[in-house]
């Protein structure tokens, strides 16, 4: 367990006395795909928010690559190599697709701030061609110069994923990447994520769709009522009676 | 892929420069061709360009920009009083001081966003105005305004052996007096430079980052950007533009009055920018021109002017027309301004530039729904964002689509 | 184009300038060189055609818009009279006069108007438009001292004569006086001198005064002038409090007055501030109070009829000074009120009178000098002594370009017979009593040299 | 001690006006999510309701008296208000009581103005950002103001308090205070409690309050929240308008008075907390009192000019240390 990229140790989070998370201990290993599942209100999104610095835990520590994350701003956490895809795509609605992807690359290049006024945005050929490549890769090659608010929901998700990928993150956090998608789209996304996984990026995925979870995850953590009730490989989880009771039960009956 | 290139921008700049320098002939037919008004066009054009760098790019609506204009003016006049009547030190000092002032106010105001930011800037500007008008009179000369006196020391001028105190001094640019037409050409050239710099900012990665902040500040955080220094830079640059404009006001007319810091003066630059089109390059300059034209020409229309204007009409009709038109000109020019402004905000949030694009029927120019939210970048080139993209994409090295 | 009736007179100049730009590409020096030559006139805006243009620069928007409107009425009337239309007004009563009712120096008088917005910036921009675009040879107007001083110094710089409208600050003809600027209106110092004896006879020598002063230049000079006078009478100044301009509600400044032991409140406010502070002072019961065994009194050193209208009944019996009032019975006043009243249906305000008079005085000076050249006109105005303009025997003092004439001490009318009959003249303080030594304020007039603008 | 007491009274009075304007502003913001820069102009329109009623009551019958002439030679006009010639002393009384009468008149008029404004303009701006709302209402304010100036001129028009409550009362030997100001204070307190009671004890008010908390949920319950919010806008307009009517005897109204109050009342709203009714009211009174204290000679001699900037200074400090305002809900506009 010493090859953990992200280790969450004894994390508690409460909102006005309500325990959203308690006693969470979780290690995400390098290059694994780790799914976090659990019924609604189990605290999955809260956990993700704690990881990216949106929420500060009430107690406990989150270490990324040996660096303490608690108390850091989201932008600092991102710079350490953590990228996140949201449940509803957070993209730059007024910019074009290519611009959306180029901006994260500037962040990678300039760190948190750069008064780049000596060059033109459209003459950043290196950044530009890499962006085009990634976008083409994700099937957005036809939309490069479209404004993003004209994209379909699925395309917006892929765009957000592209925005994360160009930063070459060490850890990619995905919040329900297939929610609300049709079966065909879901399958396409699974294929895509498999390919991303193959590049060796560590992935943490929150998902309701068990099909997605079992196709992708190396290991699974089950949350219920703000605590971890089970952890293990997909096969172990499938057979775990506690999980079936708490979560799978209602789905598979 | 961006629908616009360096060449387009250079062409835009050249055309802009040509129009500015030829302003005296172009504006002759509408009665606006006299030095003071053209100077004001240029100066408020600079002011609005600067304001647009903040509002147009980041969406932060400052209601206190006039404070920087005022600081620039006071700094310039003090430079005339203490150092030299030359315009250059005055401008330099004004720009630096207003930048510092913007740093201080920005540091506090930018801790908040949205309407809170607006109120904070408004509060700071009102404080500056109130103090300048009364308590700070030793520095600002209060109501009367700070002026250059014959007996001021002007240490730099003395050092270079000028005959200080002999006659009422006038501002100059190495010997060229900065009043009348030379004053306009000086301001015009500064305007062209300011415009060029705004093109640079708009097209730079920095400018794009500012747009991204406006678009989704939340995502910026998860993308690894710290928005604060970007906003701060935009605020300071825009404050320095305001200071520059303020110093030019003092250069062409060495008197600095406190009214130019009032919040209504800040409102005026907001009007200018929005009228022309926030977030566009040319819009603010256009808006500044229109509002200054209204202020100076429309306000001077009196009944006799109107009567001669509508002379071709029969007596009775003319009487009615003059009566109605009289509501909107002369002492009613504020009404015209209000009406025009509401029309723009309601029907043309992209400002006159959007209107122009619609009239010119530039393809695929998306409709602007909110002020400042203009996806259209400018009338030249970027309006046609989606035009030439397909060719470029085809040439782009595309791998097979993974979504089989 | 025809819709702009006052064509720029220097079209050719423009063309030269622009040709310079076109030819000289980026060089700026070339057009300026051309222009300077082309502008070599004898003096700024020398009238060359059959007409002469005057610039009337008054507040049309903002708090003093009504006052500005009245000024504009007076100017239009003056132009009519100068051109020989109407009944001639005070042209008939002015003595000595060279005016013949055929324009000025045979040229028809035309005018342009502008909006000062009661802001120095806007006023200067407007004046510059008149000078640069419309070719105005003289600028007049203004309804506040800041504006008057700002425009006056502009006029000095460009070599255009400025005939100040309503401006009451000592500075206009004191430390900020200019050779090209002339003021017919009286000033705060004269208000003090005139009020002194009247205050003494009405309120005695043993009084304690409390000042509320608008916190800007004019307020300060008035406070100082009045304080000088009252302290000279032996009054004690309890406190002088500065109030922000446009405070609206003055209650927080008024309540301390009541328990300060003061028995006179002096309001150094003008316009809206004066209307508000006086109204509120009366509401606080100040006029019904007895302090130190004396009737509590309120004094408003500078009055105007429009302000009196705004304050309504509250002004009854309150003392102050004014430059002129339409109820005066001398020939000049009667003639002016008659032609103004017939034209517009109501009597003129003091602002209207001073603006009308200034226009006539300028025209007369041109006739006297026989030229529009400013140095000669200035010469004709300096030391000019005249009568029949409503203020009795009047002197335009050469040393500071201030008119010396009688000052009216007025009080709010207790029984007004009409909506205009708001003030009642208590005393006409003779000129000798309000004349002071010009050296007390310092300042310098500067040169009278003609300039090519 | 008396001085302090008097300043508190002054502050409460001023605060009453601030609170009434701010109450409407914050109500509209909390329910409709609209930042209304024309709210000051509504206050001004209210004041001019009083002016109009007064002018209507004073409509004069003009009789020319040929035996007397004016200074400009026309026959002297003898003017008597029609109402006096019809009703005699009762007519005079009506004119004297024009301010209270105006209140009756102002309620429907202001309600109408509010509804027209909301339906005609504001409703199209619900979905647009605050900046757009600020700008369009700012434009509207300019237009309203210029129209009033066109009709009534720029000069203030004095209105007098009814004779019954004119003049001042001696509360103690040394504390003398104008009657009308006390009336105004009670009036504003009554109006404020009226609004609170309306929101608390009526089902309408409950829905509105629920909507302020969570608009979507209330919408989901099948309640037509939009229509109710329209009425809320009308109520806010009436409150500001009545504040304007009642303020006329204190401050002779002129066309620009709205702008003078606008910025201040915005600061009040922000200090109280955007969308918080209690916050607006308490901040209104608090800032009124602070302003009064800052104007005292004792304070000003230590900190010259503090009375001119105190309100803005407080706003800046509050926004920095407690961005949601005194009583704002957590998370509302707190960014």
Image (cartoon, rainbow, N blue to C red):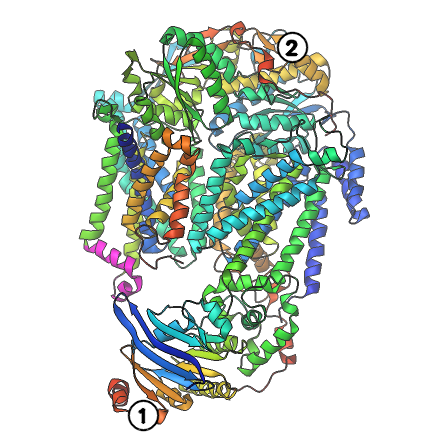
Residue sitting at x 68%, y 24%: C52
Q: Is mark 2 on a helix, strand or loop?
A: loop
Q: Name the residue under label 2.
A: C383
Discs 2 and 1 share one subunit: no
Against D117, residue B160 (above or below) is above
Q: Does the magenta stretch include residue D207?
A: yes
**Can residue D35 be seen here?**
no
Depth check: A121 or C362 in front? A121
Give whichever of D315, D111 is nearer the camera. Answer: D315
Residue A162, position in %: x, y? 52, 77
C-alpha separation, residue under disc 2 versus residue under disc 1: 111 Å
Residue C132 in the image, given as x and y percentages of width and height:
68, 33
Residue B292 falls left or right of residue C65: right
Dot 2 crowding, Cα within 10 Å, few <14, some 14–19, many 20+: some
Is there CB contact under 8 Å for labels 2 and 1?
A: no
Q: Give the range drawn in magenta.
A: D203-223
Left or right, C407 with reference to D284: right
Magenta stretch, main secondary structure, is helix
Residue corresponding to mark 1 = A238
Q: Is residue C66 part of the magenta span, yes or no?
A: no
Q: Residue D243 carries which label?
A: none
Please state which of residues C161 and A177 is positioned toward the viewer in this rendering. Answer: A177
What's the residue at 54%, 76% (across, down)? A167
In the picture as drawn, the residue positioned furthest to the left comes out as D201
Instruction: List x then y, in percent, for residue C336.
Output: 52, 13
User: Subunit of mark 2?
Assistant: C
Q: Say which quadrant the N terminus of chain B sits in.
A: bottom right
Q: Please indicate, yes or no, whether residue D274 appears anywhere in the rendered image.
A: yes
In the displayed structure, would residue D184 be above or below residue B65?
above
Q: Where is residue A38 in the image (x, y as percent from the top left)?
A: 31, 82
Q: Quadrant of residue D43?
A: top left
Q: Which of marks 2 and 1 is in front?
A: 1
């Amino acid at each position: 367990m010493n090859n953990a990229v992200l280790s969450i140790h004894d994390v508690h989070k409460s909102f006005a006395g309500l325990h959203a998370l308690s006693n969470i201990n979780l290690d995400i290993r390098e290059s694994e795909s780790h799914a976090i599942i659990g019924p609604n209100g189990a605290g999955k999104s809260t956990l993700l928010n704690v990881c990216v610095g949106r929420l500060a835990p009430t107690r406990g520590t989150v270490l990324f690559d040996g660096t303490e994350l608690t108390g850091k701003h989201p932008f600092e956490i991102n710079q350490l190599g953590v990228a996140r895809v949201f449940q509803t795509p957070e993209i730059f609605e007024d910019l074009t697709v290519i611009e959306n992807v180029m901006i994260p690359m500037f962040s990678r290049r300039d760190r948190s701030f750069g008064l780049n006024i000596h060059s033109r945005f459209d003459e950043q050929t290196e950044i530009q061609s890499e962006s085009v490549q990634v976008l083409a890769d994700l099937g957005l090659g036809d939309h490069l110069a479209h404004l993003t608010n004209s994209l379909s929901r699925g395309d917006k998700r892929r765009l957000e994923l592209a925005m994360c990928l160009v930063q070459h993150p060490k850890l990619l956090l995905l919040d329900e990447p297939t929610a609300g998608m049709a079966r065909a789209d879901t399958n396409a996304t699974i294929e895509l994520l498999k390919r991303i996984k193959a590049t060796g990026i560590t992935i943490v995925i929150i998902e309701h769709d068990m099909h997605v979870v079992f196709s992708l995850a190396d290991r699974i953590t089950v949350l219920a009522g703000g605590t971890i009730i089970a952890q293990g490989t997909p096969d172990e989880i499938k057979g775990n009676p506690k999980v079936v009771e708490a979560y799978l039960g209602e789905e598979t009956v | 892929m961006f629908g616009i290139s360096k060449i387009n921008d250079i062409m835009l700049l050249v055309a802009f420069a040509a129009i500015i320098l030829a302003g005296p002939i172009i504006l002759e037919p509408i009665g606006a061709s006299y030095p003071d008004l053209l100077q004001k066009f240029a100066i408020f054009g600079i002011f609005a360009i600067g304001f647009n760098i903040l509002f147009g790019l980041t969406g932060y609506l400052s209601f206190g920009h006039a404070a920087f204009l005022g600081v620039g003016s006071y700094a310039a006049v003090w430079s005339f009083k203490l150092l030299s009547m030359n315009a250059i030190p005055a401008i330099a000092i004004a720009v630096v001081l207003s930048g510092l002032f913007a740093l201080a106010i920005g540091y506090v105001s930018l801790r908040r966003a949205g309407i809170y930011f607006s109120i904070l800037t408004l509060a700071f500007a009102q404080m500056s105005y109130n103090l300048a008008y009364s308590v700070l009179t030793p520095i600002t000369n209060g109501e009367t305004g700070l002026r250059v006196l014959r007996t001021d020391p002007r240490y730099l001028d003395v050092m270079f052996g000028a005959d200080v105190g002999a006659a009422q001094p006038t501002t100059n640019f190495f010997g060229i007096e900065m009043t009348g037409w030379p004053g306009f050409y000086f301001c015009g050239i500064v305007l062209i430079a300011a415009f060029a710099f705004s093109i640079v900012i708009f097209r730079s990665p920095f400018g794009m980052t500012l747009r991204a902040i406006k678009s989704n500040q939340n995502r910026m955080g998860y993308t690894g950007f710290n928005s604060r220094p970007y906003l701060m830079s935009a605020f300071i640059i825009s404050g320095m533009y305001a200071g520059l404009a303020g110093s030019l006001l003092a250069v062409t007319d060495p008197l600095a009055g406190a009214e130019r810091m009032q919040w209504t003066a800040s409102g005026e630059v907001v009007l200018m920018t929005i009228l022309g089109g926030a977030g566009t390059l040319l819009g603010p300059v256009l808006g500044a021109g229109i509002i200054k034209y209204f202020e100076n020409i429309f306000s001077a229309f009196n009944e006799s002017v109107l009567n001669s204007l509508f002379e071709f009409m029969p007596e009775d009709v003319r009487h009615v027309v003059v009566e109605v038109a009289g509501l909107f000109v002369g002492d009613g020019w504020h009404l015209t301004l209000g009406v025009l402004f509401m029309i723009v905000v309601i029907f043309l949030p992209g400002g006159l530039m959007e209107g122009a694009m619609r009239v010119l029927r530039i393809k695929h120019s998306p409709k602007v729904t909110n002020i400042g939210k203009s996806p259209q970048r400018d009338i030249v080139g970027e309006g046609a964002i989606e035009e030439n993209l397909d060719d470029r994409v085809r040439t782009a090295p595309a791998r097979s689509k993974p979504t089989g | 184009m025809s819709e702009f009736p006052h064509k720029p007179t220097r079209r050719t100049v423009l063309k030269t300038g622009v040709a310079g730009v076109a030819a000289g590409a980026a060089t700026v020096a070339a057009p300026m060189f051309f222009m300077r030559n082309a502008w070599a006139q004898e003096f700024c805006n020398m009238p060359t055609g059959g007409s002469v243009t005057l610039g009337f620069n008054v507040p049309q928007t903002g708090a003093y818009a009504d006052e500005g409107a009245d000024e504009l009425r007076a100017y239009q009337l003056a132009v009519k009279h100068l051109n020989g239309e109407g009944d001639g007004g005070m042209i008939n009563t002015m003595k000595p006069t060279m005016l013949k009712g055929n324009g000025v120096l045979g040229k028809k008088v035309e005018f342009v108007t502008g909006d000062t917005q009661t802001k120095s910036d806007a006023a200067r921009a407007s004046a510059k438009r008149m000078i640069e675009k419309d070719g105005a040879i003289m600028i007049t107007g203004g309804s506040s001292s800041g504006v008057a001083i700002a425009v006056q110094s502009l006029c000095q710089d460009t070599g255009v004569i400025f005939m100040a409208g309503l401006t009451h600050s000592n500075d206009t003809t004191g430390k900020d006086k200019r050779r090209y600027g002339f003021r017919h209106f009286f000033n705060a110092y004269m208000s003090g001198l005139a009020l002194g004896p009247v205050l003494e006879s009405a309120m005695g020598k043993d009084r304690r005064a409390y000042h509320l002063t608008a916190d800007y230049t004019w307020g300060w000079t008035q406070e100082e002038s009045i304080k000088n006078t009252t302290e000279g009478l032996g009054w004690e100044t309890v406190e002088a409090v500065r109030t922000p301009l446009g405070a609206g509600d003055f209650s927080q400044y008024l309540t301390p007055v009541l328990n300060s032991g003061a028995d006179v409140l002096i309001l150094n406010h003008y316009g809206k501030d004066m209307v508000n502070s006086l109204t509120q002072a009366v509401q606080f019961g100040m006029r019904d109070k007895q302090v130190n065994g004396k009737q509590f009194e309120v004094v408003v050193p500078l009055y105007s009829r429009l302000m009196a209208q705004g304050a309504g009944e509250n002004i009854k019996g309150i003392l102050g000074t004014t430059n002129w009032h339409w109820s005066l019975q001398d020939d000049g006043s009667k003639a002016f009120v008659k032609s103004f009243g017939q034209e517009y249906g109501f009597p003129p305000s003091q602002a209207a009178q001073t603006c009308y008079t200034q226009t006539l005085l300028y025209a007369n000076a041109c006739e006297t000098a026989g030229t529009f050249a400013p140095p000669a006109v200035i010469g004709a105005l300096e030391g000019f002594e005249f009568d029949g303009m409503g203020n009795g025997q009047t002197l335009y003092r050469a040393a500071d370009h201030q008119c010396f004439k009688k000052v009216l001490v007025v009080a709010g009318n207790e029984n007004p017979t009409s909506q205009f009959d708001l003030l009642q003249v208590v005393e006409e303080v003779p000129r000798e009593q309000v004349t002071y030594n010009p050296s007390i304020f310092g300042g310098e007039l500067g040169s009278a040299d003609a300039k090519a603008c | 001690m008396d001085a302090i007491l008097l300043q508190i009274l002054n502050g409460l009075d001023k605060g009453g006006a601030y609170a009434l304007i701010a109450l409407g502003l914050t109500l509209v913001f909390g329910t409709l999510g609209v930042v209304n820069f024309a709210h000051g102009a509504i206050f001004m329109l209210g004041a001019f309701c009083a002016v109009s009623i007064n002018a209507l009551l004073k409509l004069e019958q003009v009789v020319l008296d040929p035996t007397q002439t004016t200074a400009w030679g026309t026959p002297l006009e003898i003017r008597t208000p029609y109402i006096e010639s019809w009703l005699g002393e009762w007519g005079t009384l009506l004119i004297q009581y024009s301010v209270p009468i105006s209140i009756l008149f102002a309620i429907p008029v202001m309600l109408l103005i509010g509804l027209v404004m909301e339906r005609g303009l504001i409703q199209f701006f619900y979905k647009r950002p605050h900046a757009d709302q600020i700008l369009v209402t700012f434009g509207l304010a300019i237009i309203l103001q210029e129209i009033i100036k066109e009709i009534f001129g720029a000069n203030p028009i004095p209105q007098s308090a009814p004779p019954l409550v004119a003049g001042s009362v001696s509360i103690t030997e040394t504390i003398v205070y104008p009657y009308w100001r006390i009336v105004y204070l009670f009036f504003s307190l009554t109006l404020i409690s009226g609004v609170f009671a309306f929101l608390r004890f009526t089902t309408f008010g409950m829905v509105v309050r629920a909507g302020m908390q969570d608009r979507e949920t209330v919408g989901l319950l099948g309640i037509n929240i939009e229509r109710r919010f329209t009425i809320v806008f009308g109520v806010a307009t009436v409150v500001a308008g009545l504040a304007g009517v009642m303020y006329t005897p204190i401050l002779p109204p002129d066309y620009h008075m709205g702008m003078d109050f606008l910025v201040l009342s915005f600061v009040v709203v922000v200090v109280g907390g955007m969308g918080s009714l209690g916050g607006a009211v308490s901040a209104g009174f608090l800032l009124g009192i602070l302003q009064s204290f800052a104007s005292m000679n004792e304070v000003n001699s230590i900190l010259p000019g503090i009375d001119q900037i105190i309100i803005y200074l407080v706003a800046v400090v509050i926004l920095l240390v407690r961005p949601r305002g005194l009583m704002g809900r957590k998370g509302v506009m707190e960014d």
